[in-house]
Amino acid sequence: MNTIELVAPAGSPEALDAAIGAGADAVYLGVKNFNARLRTTNFAYSQVEAAIRTLRRMGKRCYITVNTVFEQREADRMYQLLNYLSRIEPDGLIIQDFGVAYMARQRFPALKLHASTQMNIASGCGVNVLSKRGISRVVLARELALEEIRDIRSKTNSELEVFVHGALCISESGLCLFSSFLGGKSANRGMCTQACRRMYRTAGRVSEEGYFFSPADLQMIEKIPFLADAGVNAFKIEGRMKSADYAGVVVGAYRVALDSLGGSEEQTANAIERAKRILQNDLAREKTIFHYDLRADLSFLNPRKAGGVGVALGKILKVRKKGEDCQGLIALGHTPVAEGDSIRIHSSDDRRRLSHKLTAVELAGSEAWISIPHDFTAGDDVFLIQTKAMSKWSPRRLSPIIPKNLDMFKRAPGHEEAPHIEFGRRGKAGASGGAGVQSVQNAQKPKSARSLPEGLYAAVSHTSDLYAAQSIKPVKVLLTLNKRTLECLNMFDKQRRPLPFRAADIILAFDPFFPQALESSFIKAMPRLYQEGFRTFQINNLAHISLFRNFTAFAGAESAVKLIAGPYLYAFNRFAAAFVYDLGVDYIVSPFENNRQNLERTFERRERSSVFVTVFAYPALFRIRNDLSPLYPWERFGDNQDEYFSLITEPDETGLGESLVVPEKPFSIVDKIPFLHEAGFRRFILDFSGPALKKKEYKTVMTAAKEGVPLPNASRFNWKDGFFNEDRK
């Protein structure tokens, strides 16, 4: 059996020491910017350099997380960071942004690149697209089942890494827009505010409260032998925001399990039982194996379980002052507490959450007075998140990996300018301004028979919605392409019923989540769709590009397939756009989270006619690989800020189904179309693919778009203010 790498989180120098001391083969850590855990401690540049040197001497590996998207204004900073990392030579970079991949391959080819789970790669096709573009390892999406992972392994030679332990996202990997929609704190920028962990209430006649979207934590310790047998190269533990004790406990448990592989079945079983006992000290949330069995099992959601980590100790009964300290009275149940333990307190309205180490515990019969932070009161919930005794399971190194004296580690990012990218014919791109990179100076893709018409496009999610879209007369219509749509299109074909639009006027738009279970059915379907006259497709996942590899036999501009890179192939900068254009696409749709300033910085005026801008949408804030209707038979719900949302659920052929959470208040910049047109943008999307709408609502939106007037009760999303930053406070 091949050696499997155990990859551990290091959110602090102490966690780094604990992870290596407990037996990790590799650690992943972040610097101060451009990583998906900006709220954790992260590392100074000198510390990163020192850690890499020490770990290499120990035969361990160090991966640096650069796993967020960057805007065009940040291109110089990203270039400077990559230049710095190329000099200190980590064992790999974990990346999300296609722009980082493009920049690294063009200018820093020695950097080894790993695709983050945020890239949303869930199929062998997706892995191979990245492999051809210099990505040596892919961290697969967390929503996959064992049989899907095994199938991916059979279709690629790339290294595969999977998460085996830690917190889960309810939304499919890399596709969560909830936190960003509420205030610009994007999960794709490392600023997630964990909207999934909040308490919500239904908005029907009977109001229910619950943590509807807070999943249990992943724990795959019992499945380690099967994942190893499936050919996984690396097991990853989540938790860069967790303590050093957490790192030591969890890494130690998985080390025990991994070391038993290759022995007898009895030895492995005994080792896993020992590992499970160690993990009993991981006082996080309830545990789940998630989609491992590819079954419609919703047990990973418990709406009655609070969204925070830890073991529930109950509510604060009373509060008293003792000197300058504040204490709360709790009832003692089966879980004892002691001075030095760590707790987490949630306010009763779920607006405040704070961790606290107990400085005092005073027993009072079946109750106890415990120290609490000020401003918490009776009725607030208390959770035990870590015990003082936990440290006995966390081995410590005799000397720290990062030395106290860092005087010899002086390297840091410089002040270089990123090269300028020129887009050439048919999506070819080149970088100018530097040695060793050929410049492509063709300024704009020429207009030809391949061009799509200018104007307003309508997007819908069901074939039945095509009739409503027809009433507003868009220049073309986008139809969501999934297994349900394929079946409906097949029905129309068999019954010889005409669609309300010609096939040539329908753009088939793929769902952004493309799991291995769907791959073969779509590969078989594409030639039939082509024969039926469908020529234009919107791709939203790297895997989709592989579906068109058999179309090269069709020659001529009239018969060729046109490809549009959808909003989920995040092109927030020119480098990402260059990567996407090099896939062979003809047009790019601006991401939902984008803002006007960044959009105009990314694309020069002469390039903007090849860019679609979505001006109306109910964007999917969560995209969930489950039909949640058996658990939640309602649709409308709200939060404590009186924001309301809809839950849209559907079954699918994998047995898991799909659910979307969309805002009740749509995103709209229809009144900005005249200004966008003046700036050089020519193609706009009215996206009606969210909740079911009436024809009258279609016409209201279209009228506002044509007249350039604002829609009432709509959100601007990030269009005006952009992503959250400290200046926005």
Image (tube, rainbow, N blue to C red):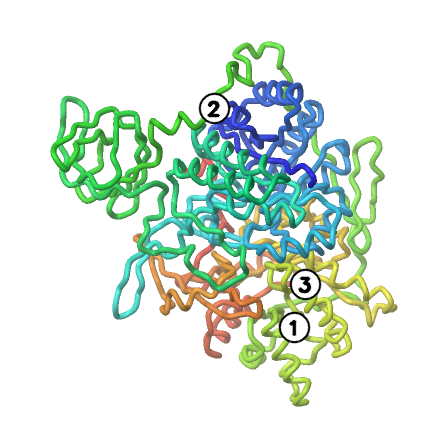
Q: Separation of disc 3 and disc 1 at Cα? A: 27 Å
Residue 415: image x %, image y %? 66, 24
Q: In the rendered structure, which amino acid carries the disc numbered 3?
A: Glu
Q: Say if residue 648 shows up in the picture.
A: yes
- Look at 25% across and 32% down and name the residue there: 337
In the image, is 333 to the left or to the right of 717? left
Asked if labels 1 and 3 touch by Cβ distance under 8 angstroms, the answer is: no
Q: Residues within 10 Å of mark 3 (few under 14, many from 20)?
A: some
Question: Disc 1 on helix, strand or loop?
Answer: strand
- Look at 68% across and 66% down and name the residue there: 454
Residue 728: image x %, image y %? 44, 39
Q: In the rendered structure, which amino acid carries the disc numbered 1?
A: Lys
Residue under pointer 2: 395
- Look at 81% across and 66% down and name the residue there: 551
Q: Earlier in the sequence, mark 3 or mark 1?
A: 1
Residue under pointer 1: 476
Residue under pointer 3: 519
Question: Disc 2 on helix, strand or loop?
Answer: loop
Question: Disc 3 on helix, strand or loop?
Answer: helix
Quarter of the figure with residue 418:
top right
